[in-house]
Image (tube, rainbow, N blue to C red):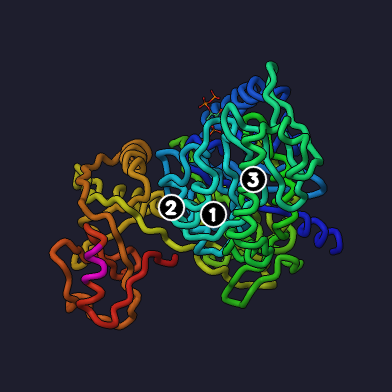
Amino acid sequence: MSNIREEINRRRTFAIISHPDAGKTTLTEKFLLYGGAINLAGSVKGRKAARHAVSDWMEIEKERGISVTSSVMQFEYDGKCINILDTPGHQDFSEDTYRTLMAADSAVMVIDGSKGVEAQTIKLFKVCVMRHIPIFTFINKMDREANDPFELIDEIETVLGIRTCPVNWPIGSGKSFKGVYDRQTEVISRFIQGDNGHKTDVVEAKVGDDGLDELLTHELHEKLIEDIELLDGASDEFDIDRIQKGELSPVFFGSALTNFGVETFLQHFLKMTTAPLSRTSDAGDIDPFDENFSAFVFKIQANMNKAHRDRIAFMRICSGKFDADQEVYHVQGGRKLRLTQPQQMMAQERKHVEEAYAGDIIGVFDPGIFAIGDTICMPKKQFAYEGIPTFAPEHFARIRQVDTMKRKQFIKGIEQIALEGAVQIFQEFNTGMEEIIAGVVGVLQFDVLKYRLENEYRVEIRMEQLPYEHIRWIENKDIDVSALSLTTDTKKIRDLKGRPLLLFTHPWSVNTVLDRNEGLILSEFGTN
Ligand code: G4P
């Protein structure tokens, strides 16, 4: 048992989020490098080599029919066992991305110093805030001309609505980037741009010392003194409690590509985060150190090989130890089973796992029995974890099958795909499944839906995009939905569980409808 405690205690599980191109992949690779999980030689060249290796592996995965979007990587650093959950950013932004955040205990937000806060970061950030998980900010690409650092943190505070606390502070940027000043240790890490790449040098000099004029230039040294004064007066104080509640984000400046500031970031990050915390269930909070294994499914990955409809269910272990031989209980399915072909990702390698601990993510073979949010626990201690919220889709389309004889396949296919969580399916308010409305978070999911229905279920469909962009679940239990006073651009629909919802074209209609219907409670998230 003490071994289990130790193993859980050294687990750290975080999601890495960013807008595409901010440097998430580069930063992840550098983390893995520190963990010794991958072998990279220099900076740029090594990184390319590593990326090449990663994409080779992706090809293999594709051949085997498993999409790689769900990368979970594990590595060891300084006695800690760290799980990184990669959130697929890019155009293929989908609910999966949101759900991945439900499986993490903290988030690292990568921001491009020359771009500031970008659209997709805002979306992802909302979920982190909803979960009150600690959020660490890494402002990247300081080796390029960046925006003013005060403007950058001001933007994070106003756009994302979280207070910040810079842990280090940049000295210049781009061609004149001289390094960062650590506000806690008051030490300067110098960034030296040489002909053959970059070097880091730590200077133990106090700000104001004569020698610094020469190292930093007089102008930047003066600016640093001013900046520190301003920061000490105006920024929030470092407060670990507020950080752990997700109210205050520690901010770090660096450059992932040149590997500057990455290791110090990792070290601070490990000090400021905790081992897995308890999670809410219908039997109260479950302690991760409880010896009974439990987990919940946060992602289901369809096998792209259409000959086999099997899938992989990714689960986050929330308590105890997973043992491949043990019999477990699938709460929603109401039966005992053994989890087959459990696997885990170690950097680029997918490997079979015999044991794993709270904080870890495992993927298991799913013959089509698991759904997102399902709980797996020990037969002797049964409970269900709180459901994963259904995130608000932002694009809607009406879907009809072309050949009406294929009704059964159509319904089956669409229900299966919805179960995986790739799309959300709704019905017209007053009719049955004749007309289906599909809702997605990322518009690319419509193409995926069409492709999969045609290829896996042999059903051709017609899709008509609808103008709605905002969805709200009606939370009131006893309400006569047909009696509601709505605006002309509002549509009533139902989800597959029969719960009533409203679709709006304009965001202001949401408020109008709330004003017109006293006591009406609308929510942006439905719970599975
Ligand atoms: P992502 O996963 O967030 O989408 O970003 P990724 O790491 O792929 O980085 C996007 C681009 O930004 C890459 O350039 C990468 O080399 C560059 N980059 C990442 N971190 C830094 C940094 O600290 N400084 C500078 N100057 N550039 C950085 P690319 O040209 O798209 O790819 P590649 O040709 O370098 O592979």
Q: Residue furthest top?
A: 195
In the figure, is residue 181 to the left or right of 93? right
- The numbered mark at residue 123 is 2
Instruction: Tell me the magenta residue range.
Output: 508-512
Residue 186 percent location from the top left of the image? 75, 48
- The numbered mark at residue 101 is 1
Would you say residue 62 is visible in this rendering?
A: yes
Q: Nearer the viewer, residue 201 or 308?
A: 201
Residue 151 percent location from the top left of the image? 49, 47
Q: Ligand 1 is located in which of the four quadrants?
A: top right
- Residue at 41%, 58% (x, y): give it: 391
Looking at marks 2 and 1 on the same chain, the residue that comes earlier in the sequence is marked by 1
Q: For the residues carrying marks 1 and 3, which lies nearer the camera in this image?
A: 3
Q: Residue furthest right?
A: 2
Disc 2 crowd, CA 10 A, few/some/many (<14, 14-19, 20+): few
Q: Which residue is mark 3?
A: 169
Assign the magenta stretch its main secondary structure: helix
Q: Regarding mark 1 in the picture, which secondary structure is present there?
A: helix
